[in-house]
Image: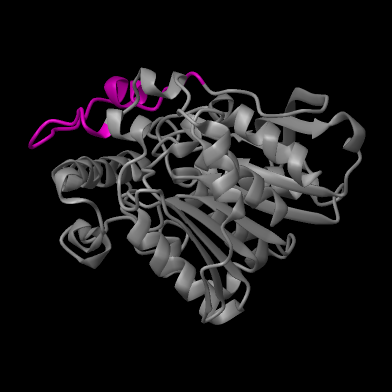
């Protein structure tokens, strides 16, 4: 659902950014500190996001062929938000009998930082590239004063589960000797891969992951599409935009099934396994978790269920919900103020 709206910039960008930055903690409950950053007017789509969602036809049908699906993950139009000199270089990581391309991102004045973020891009397990989130991660690296490793992990179905996870594990294993503090993060499917890598690092004794940075992750495979995690009727929205929201959910219900199919590629695996479905994992694994999602993201309800579990057990979770925003909001880096606020906030919590 990408169109040329991602190349435009929201009207009143700076004023809205200042408003979002001024909003304080909404609640602290059961180990979760929450910031609900509603739009003004509340419960309406951000105009640039609305241009995209409003295009969805009634009874939408998502294509199932891989070429079309991968086209749908392509991005363009993001802006560089950094203000200091950055070093961006491609590297090959060789570890655990795997060779993985990464893009290493760091401030020129913090090249020897002792903190690393290992990051996994989104794209429904079958698409996307590290370059899609490069500008977003440059800003995170600048704001967090950490080194970011943007991982080009194996994509399904050519290299299905667990290949992408093993690539991520190899990168973390290679970094342990160089960094005192290691965090993992990702957006959408990349968030799921990050959480799988974290579980393996813990169970294999490689390292303890210091923190988890998740942008709108997908957290369960084979979800009950008629269950409470997909109930768009529970989401507040102005009446004139509700039908469009429902059509968006219909598309993502199809996507949920399609991406799971490509990810496991007909392997006889249990979709409830915690590496595939982190919502069903032991939440103790996920210390210092920050999760950021849009108000109208179809994965929002599973994300909220996850962060509540993690907070209840670990007492150190952070949750941010941005009003009017839908899925894949990093595509709007530099163009929608909520995205800049989300990136800056996430960097501070690493």
> Is residue 65 found inside the magenta-colored segment of the image?
yes
Does 306 sit above or below residue 71?
below
Q: Which span of residues is magenta-colored?
A: 53-77
Percent position of residue 322, x then y: 45, 51
Does 162 sit above or below residue 78?
below
The image quadrant that residue 311 belongs to is bottom right
Percent position of residue 183, x then y: 70, 54
Q: Quadrant of the C terminus?
A: bottom right
Q: Is residue 68 left or right of residue 218?
A: left
Q: Quadrant of the N terminus?
A: top left
Camera-side residue of 45 and 245: 45
Q: Is residue 167 visible?
A: no
Q: Residue drawn at (53%, 37%), measured in percent from left and top?
A: 337
> Is residue 211 found inside the magenta-colored segment of the image?
no
Q: Residue drawn at (64%, 24%), measured in percent from left and top?
A: 80
Percent position of residue 140, x then y: 69, 40
Q: Residue drawn at (46%, 33%), measured in percent from left and top?
A: 155
């Amino acid at each position: 659902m990408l169109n040329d709206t991602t190349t435009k910039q929201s009207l009143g960008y700076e004023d809205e950014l200042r408003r979002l930055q001024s909003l304080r903690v909404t609640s602290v409950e059961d180990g979760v500190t929450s910031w609900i950053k509603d739009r003004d007017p509340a419960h309406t789509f951000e105009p640039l996001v609305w241009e995209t969602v409003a295009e969805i036809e009634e009874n939408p049908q998502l294509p199932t062929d891989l070429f079309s699906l991968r086209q749908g993950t392509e991005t363009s139009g993001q802006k560089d938000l950094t203000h200091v000199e950055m070093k961006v270089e491609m590297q090959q990581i060789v570890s655990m009998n795997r060779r993985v391309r990464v893009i290493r991102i760091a401030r020129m004045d913090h090249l020897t930082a002792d903190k690393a973020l290992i990051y996994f891009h989104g794209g429904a397990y079958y698409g996307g590239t590290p370059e899609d989130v490069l500008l977003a991660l440059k800003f995170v690296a600048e704001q967090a004063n950490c080194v970011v490793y943007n991982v080009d992990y194996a994509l399904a179905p050519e290299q299905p589960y667990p290949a992408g996870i093993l690539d991520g594990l190899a990168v973390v294993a290679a970094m342990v000797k160089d960094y005192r503090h290691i965090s993992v993060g990702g957006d959408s499917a990349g968030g799921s891969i990050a959480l799988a890598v974290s579980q393996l690092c813990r169970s294999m004794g490689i390292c303890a992951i210091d923190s988890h940075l998740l942008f709108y992750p997908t957290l369960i495979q084979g979800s009950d599409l008629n269950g409470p995690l997909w109930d768009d009727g529970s989401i507040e929205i102005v009446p004139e935009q509700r039908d469009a929201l429902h059509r968006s959910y219909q598309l993502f219900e199809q996507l949920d099934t399609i991406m799971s199919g490509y990810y496991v590629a007909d392997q006889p695996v249990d979709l409830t396994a915690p590496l595939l479905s982190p919502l069903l994992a032991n939440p103790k694994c996920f210390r210092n978790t920050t999760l950021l999602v849009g108000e109208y993201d179809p994965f929002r309800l599973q994300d909220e269920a996850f962060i509540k579990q993690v907070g209840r057990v670990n007492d150190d979770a952070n949750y941010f919900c941005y009003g009017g925003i839908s899925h894949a909001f990093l595509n709007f880096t530099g163009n929608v103020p909520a995205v800049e606020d989300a990136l800056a906030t996430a960097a501070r919590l690493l």
